Image (cartoon, helix red, strand yellow):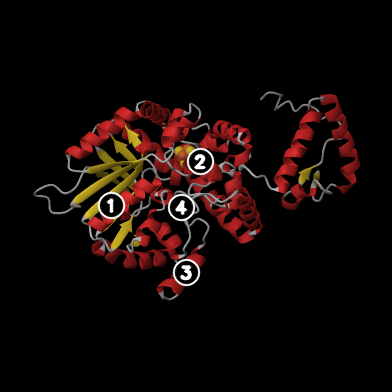
């Protein structure tokens, strides 16, 4: 999905911030995810060591991506898997639609896959009169609502169990319930029969092991495994960065991925897929295809700063800690990939229409702290901001943003003279003190009122602050 314009982003963000109910749901869900992950990481003393090891594997894999992809293709083809390299989203979509037509598919079941969201596969299959059914519970819910996922691992994070109860009542004509177990049972009953009826299954890939030609799927519901094994034809869609060199490398990723993403030691299902059914085997898919997608990834590879983006495991942890995502949720970004990782991926995947997204960050660094493969997201954001500013045609700044840029330029001029900045700060502190409550200003006059519409402003100090001995400068 091509991201919305910068004006659209501002409009959607304002609406999301004003939606108190949405903010409550996001805060609840993000706090829960952060707490679970923090506990799982604290209980695992080797976490930092595994993180370093996983990072080292990614550095190696991305450093010799061409060799590894050829090795992966060779190993897969030797077992009868058809491998297709897609230069862009259109090539990937066309190939998969052709495979579906060839398989005579009337129904395609899908496991969770952000890569297929990226290439808008559902729309392409539906355009070819082929029904598509998402089988991951969160994806199924957003599909029923006609929405896109709002988080890369928890697609329905913006909904409460009451919202889902109402949705099922309206769309599936079942009695209302908000009991999570009952809601899951309703979805399971609807989805089970579809696995048997579908002629084709499509999933993403978490890791592709070059040494053995094995695809690894990591999930909690078992729907990915059924999608990959029950229909006669199976298509796996992976970004070219998903390849890792050896089977031994996998354990480092399995040790960190679930802990960081959901706070589990391991996900419930880890499936290893080596190819279609072999002679003498009683089950498994008869035909298997792997689509390896570029779609801008080689451009990232060629950029020494951006290439680190390709280390991403799509664990979603950077979304859970991001103060911007926490306030506006995923849909406001208007991109398949929201949050910090989306802000560094989208400009290369979707082009100029996403060049404003690297500005949707406070640069607080929480994303870098939490990332299990230590991606320096703030550095990449600054790199992309510099690129976007150099090519200012890519951004048509709305009036409010232009005003903020002018204000920042004026501030920069004053800040070059520290004595003047101090003097102005003290004067402002003295003048504004009568209007402050507990050291904060609730309202400010134009042009500063844009700030206090959404948050309080700390009163500038009218006297020099004594240095806190616990936090000496430079710490
Ligand atoms: S950038 Fe890091 S934290 Fe964010 S989704 Fe990717 S691996 Fe996870």
| Mark 3 or mark 4, earlier in chain | 4
Would residue 284 be found to the left or right of residue 359 on screen?
left
- SS class, disc 3: helix
| Mark 2 or mark 1, earlier in chain | 1
Q: Residue at x 8, y 49 (%)?
A: 280
- Give residue 225's mark: 1
CA gap between label 3 and label 4 equals 17 Å
Marks 2 and 4: in contact by CB < 8 Å? no
- Give residue 167's mark: 3
One can see residue 245 in this view = no
Residue 275, position as x, y percentages in the image: 20, 44
Would residue 106 be found to the left or right of residue 321 on screen?
left
Q: Residue at x 62, y 56 (%)?
A: 16
Q: Residue at x 90, y 35 (%)?
A: 427
**What residue is disc 4 on?**
154
Marks 3 and 1: in contact by CB < 8 Å? no
Q: Report the front residue among 303 and 280.
A: 303
| Mark 4 or mark 1, earlier in chain | 4
- Give residue 341's mark: 2
| Mark 3 or mark 2, earlier in chain | 3
Farthest residue toward the left?
A: 280
Looking at the rendering, in which quadrant would you find the C terminus?
Answer: top right
* Badge nearest the viewer, 3 or 2: 2
| Mark 1 or mark 3, earlier in chain | 3
* Badge nearest the viewer, 2 or 1: 2
- SS class, disc 2: helix
Ligand 1 within 8 Å of the CB at mark 2? yes
Farthest residue toward the front?
A: 393
Query: Label 3 crowding class (10 Å Cα cut-off): few <14, some 14-19, many 20+?
Result: some
């Amino acid at each position: 999905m091509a991201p919305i314009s910068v004006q659209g982003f501002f409009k959607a963000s304002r609406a999301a911030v004003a939606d108190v109910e949405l903010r409550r749901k996001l805060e609840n869900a993000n706090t829960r995810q952060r707490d679970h992950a923090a506990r799982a990481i604290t209980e695992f003393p080797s976490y930092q060591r595994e993180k370093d090891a996983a990072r080292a594997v990614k550095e190696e894999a991305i450093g010799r991506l061409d060799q590894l992809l050829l090795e992966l293709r060779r190993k897969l083809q030797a077992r009868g898997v058809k491998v297709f390299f897609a230069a862009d989203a259109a090539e990937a979509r066309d190939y998969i639609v052709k495979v579906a037509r060839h398989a005579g598919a009337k129904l395609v079941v899908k496991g969770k896959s952000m890569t297929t969201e990226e290439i808008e596969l559902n729309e392409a299959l539906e355009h070819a009169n082929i029904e598509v059914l998402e089988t991951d519970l969160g994806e199924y819910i957003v599909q029923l609502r006609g929405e896109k996922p709002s988080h890369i691992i928890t697609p329905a994070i913006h909904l409460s169990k009451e919202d889902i109860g109402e949705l099922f009542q309206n769309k599936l004509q079942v009695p209302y319930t908000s009991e999570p177990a009952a809601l899951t049972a309703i979805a399971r009953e609807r989805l089970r029969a579809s696995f048997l009826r579908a002629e084709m299954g499509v999933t993403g890939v978490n890791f592709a092991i070059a040494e053995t030609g094995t695809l690894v799927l990591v999930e909690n519901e078992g729907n990915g495994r059924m999608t990959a094994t029950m229909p006669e034809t199976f298509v796996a869609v992976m970004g070219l960065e998903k390849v890792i060199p050896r089977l031994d490398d996998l354990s480092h990723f399995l040790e960190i991925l679930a802990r960081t993403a959901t706070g589990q030691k391991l996900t419930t299902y880890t499936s290893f897929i080596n190819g279609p059914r072999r002679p003498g085997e009683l089950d498994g898919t008869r035909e298997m295809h792997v689509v390896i997608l570029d779609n801008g990834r080689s451009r990232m590879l060629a950029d020494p700063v951006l290439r680190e983006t390709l280390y991403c495991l799509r664990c979603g942890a950077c979304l859970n800690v991001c103060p911007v995502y926490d306030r506006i949720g995923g849909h406001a970004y208007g991109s398949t990939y929201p949050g910090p990782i989306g802000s560094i991926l989208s400009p290369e995947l979707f082009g100029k229409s996403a060049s404003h997204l690297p500005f949707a960050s406070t640069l607080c660094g929480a994303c870098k702290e939490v990332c299990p493969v230590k991606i320096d997201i703030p550095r990449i954001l600054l790199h992309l901001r510099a690129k976007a500013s150099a090519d200012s045609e890519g951004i048509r700044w709305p009036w409010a943003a232009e005003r903020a840029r002018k204000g920042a330029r004026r501030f920069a001029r004053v800040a070059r003279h520290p004595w003047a900045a101090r003097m102005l700060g003290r004067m402002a502190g003295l003048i504004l003190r009568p209007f402050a409550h507990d050291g904060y200003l609730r309202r400010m006059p134009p042009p500063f009122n844009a700030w206090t519409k959404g948050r309080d402003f700390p009163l500038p100090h009218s006297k020099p602050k004594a240095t806190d001995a616990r936090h000496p400068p430079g710490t």
